[in-house]
């Protein structure tokens, strides 16, 4: 059983798997703010197709958002996305990733990854790109988490059941945050 505070939770996985929804539900439950996915804000304001360099800028800002939460008095910190998402994005789309991003994801201070499985309906969004690659992408995320021996929990089923399953997992493994 885990007993330190705060607990840092990164919500990760392929697009359209309910990451933001889960971050919002957990933040409401725990009465805290969650750390948003900066990519969405950046890309919505971009008036052209994004490039590799844009993803690097997104990574820099996301890394700053993550690091700005390390000295908190909250019991729990929830990241709607984290550096593994950017690492996988860059490798999958461009076949390359700067070393600093790889190191950032490996060394980010996250106690538990909630890996969202693509078993809910894919929602169209103009920012989403890979509706047919979700299982392949999920496998890439899980392979990386296993390779780095990261603690993770696979989040499955419908949205409400996902929330219930995560709460039950947290109550068993992190009871001191309740």
Image (tube, rainbow, N blue to C red):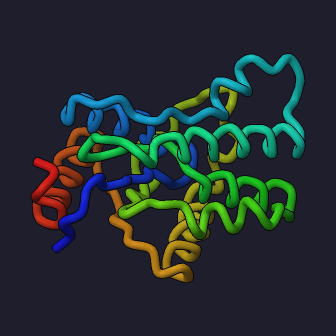
Q: Is residue 30 left or right of residue 128?
A: left
Rendered residue at 22%/39% (across/down): 160
| Of residues 88 and 118, the one drawn nearer to the viewer in this rendering | 88
**169 w.r.t. 73: above or below:** below
- At horizontal 36% and vertical 62% (from top left) the residue drawn is 112
- Please say if 52 is above or below 176: above
Q: How many marks?
A: 0
Side of 25 relative to 133 (left or right): left
The quadrant in which residue 33 appears is top left
Q: Is 128 drawn above or below residue 92 in the view shown?
A: above
Q: Quadrant of residue 153?
A: bottom left
Residue lying at 76% horizontally and 62% vertically, measured from the top left:
100
Q: Position of residue 127 (x, y in %)?
A: 68, 30
Query: How far across and down, in percent of the image, does residue 20 sit?
Result: 44, 35
Identify the residue at image location x=28%, y=44%: 158
**Toward the viewer: 158 or 44?**
44
Give the quadrant of the N terminus: bottom left
Residue 50, how many percent across, how many down? 85, 34
What x and y, as percent, mark residue 9?
Answer: 37, 53
């Amino acid at each position: 059983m885990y007993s330190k505070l705060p607990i840092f939770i990164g919500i990760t996985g392929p697009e359209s798997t309910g990451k933001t929804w889960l971050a919002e539900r957990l933040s409401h439950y725990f009465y805290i703010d969650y750390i948003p996915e900066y990519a969405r804000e950046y890309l919505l304001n971009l008036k052209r197709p994004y490039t590799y360099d844009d993803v690097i800028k997104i990574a820099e800002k996301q890394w700053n958002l993550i690091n700005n939460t390390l000295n908190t008095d909250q019991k729990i910190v929830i990241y709607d996305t984290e550096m593994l998402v950017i690492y996988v994005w860059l490798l999958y789309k461009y076949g390359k990733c700067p070393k600093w991003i790889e190191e950032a994801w490996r060394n980010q201070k996250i106690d538990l990854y909630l890996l969202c499985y693509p078993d809910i309906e894919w929602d169209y969004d103009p920012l989403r790109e890979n509706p047919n690659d979700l299982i392949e992408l999920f496998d890439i995320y899980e392979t990386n988490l296993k390779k780095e021996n990261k603690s993770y929990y696979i989040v499955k089923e419908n949205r409400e059941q996902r929330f219930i399953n995560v709460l039950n997992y947290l109550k068993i493994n992190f009871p001191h945050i309740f």
